Amino acid sequence: MARLQLLYIHGFGSRVDPQGDKQVALRKIADITAFAPDYAQPYAQILQEVAPLLKDVDLFIGTSAHADR
């Protein structure tokens, strides 16, 4: 059985950190593609950037803040 393919979209002001707690935990159950949009860009541009990433995923999730903030 193939592993779950997950797209992890970071929230405002976040960055992709492959060693971050959330990604480490998620990699136990899925293969992850992480994406941190530049939310200062127009909505249409962000959608254009994320659309190709959605093609081969089974599920996408997002977060909006770190627990320590």
Image: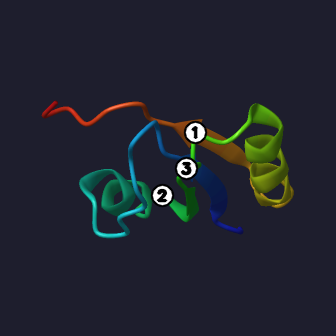
Residue 52 — which label?
Answer: none
| Left or right, residue 51 beside residue 31 | right
Residue 29 — which label?
Answer: 2
- State which quadrant residue 24 falls in: bottom left
Amino acid carrying mark 3 in the image: Tyr
From the top left corner, tell me how far across and down residue 36 is, in percent: 53, 52
Residue with the mark numbered 3? 8
Task: Between label 2 and label 1, give the one nearer the viewer.
Answer: 1
| Left or right, residue 24 beside residue 33 | left
- Residue placed at 16% from the left, 30% from the top? 69
Q: Secondary structure at mark 2?
A: loop
Task: Between label 1 and label 3, give the one nearer the viewer.
Answer: 1
56 vs 59: above or below: below
Residue with the mark numbered 1? 39
- Residue placed at 83% from the left, 37% from the top? 44
| Left or right, residue 22 beside residue 61 | left
Amino acid carrying mark 1 in the image: Tyr
Mark with earlier residue (3, 2): 3
